[in-house]
Amino acid sequence: MAINCDLCGKRVEILAKAVIEGVQLDVCSDCARFGKVVQQPKRLDAKSQIRQMQKSPQKEEKMELLVENYAEIIRKRRESMGLTQKDFAGKISEKEATVHKIETGALAPPLSLAKKLERFLGVRLVEEYEESHETPKGREINGFTLGDFINVRK
């Protein structure tokens, strides 16, 4: 079973660990010359290749994102509470200019501030977004490799 070189993407049976540009990569013998080899090439047996593929077949990412219409939600809720921007800024311990920029959409509040606004206003401004990436088994990856972006000095 062949494995892709981290640098050029070539499918090979034997990979070496090399430090290239300060990054440790699993590379083919051709690419190993571009850096310092830290572990000699070794042939992976079928069992270790299967184990390696099973280690991370699916990666899950959880992110918190600000809702699209956050500025409108904040402004409408503040107005419904009968607060001016100045009063509102004082109650949440922020500058009036910051509140103005947030309400006009010129400034997306950091997540910590968005959560503070959520608690004070009683609205949802942060959504949890979950994304899972599954590496295809037995398929060749047709994307870019690190080697596509580096310039080799000769």
Image (tube, rainbow, N blue to C red):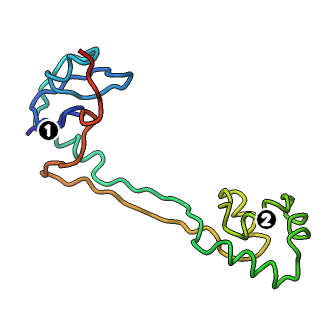
Q: Which mark is residue 99?
A: 2
Say whether marks 1 and 2 touch (CB < 8 Å): no
Q: Residue at x 28, y 26 (%)?
A: 151
Quarter of the image for residue 2 reads top left
Q: Quadrant of residue 28?
A: top left
Amino acid type of the residue that numbered disc 1 sits on in the rendered structure: Lys
Q: Tell us which disc is closer to us: 1 or 2.
A: 2
Q: Nearer the viewer, residue 87 or 16?
A: 87
Quarter holding the C terminus is top left
SS of the residue under disc 1: helix
* SS label for mark 2: helix
Disc nearer the start of the sequence (1/2): 1
Percent x, y for residue 56? 30, 47
Q: Amino acid at mark 2?
A: Val
The residue to which callout 1 is attached is 47
- Quadrant placement of the N terminus: top left
Question: Crowding near pointer 2: few (<14 within 10 Å), some, many (20+)?
Answer: many
Q: Residues within 10 Å of mark 1 (few under 14, many from 20)?
A: few
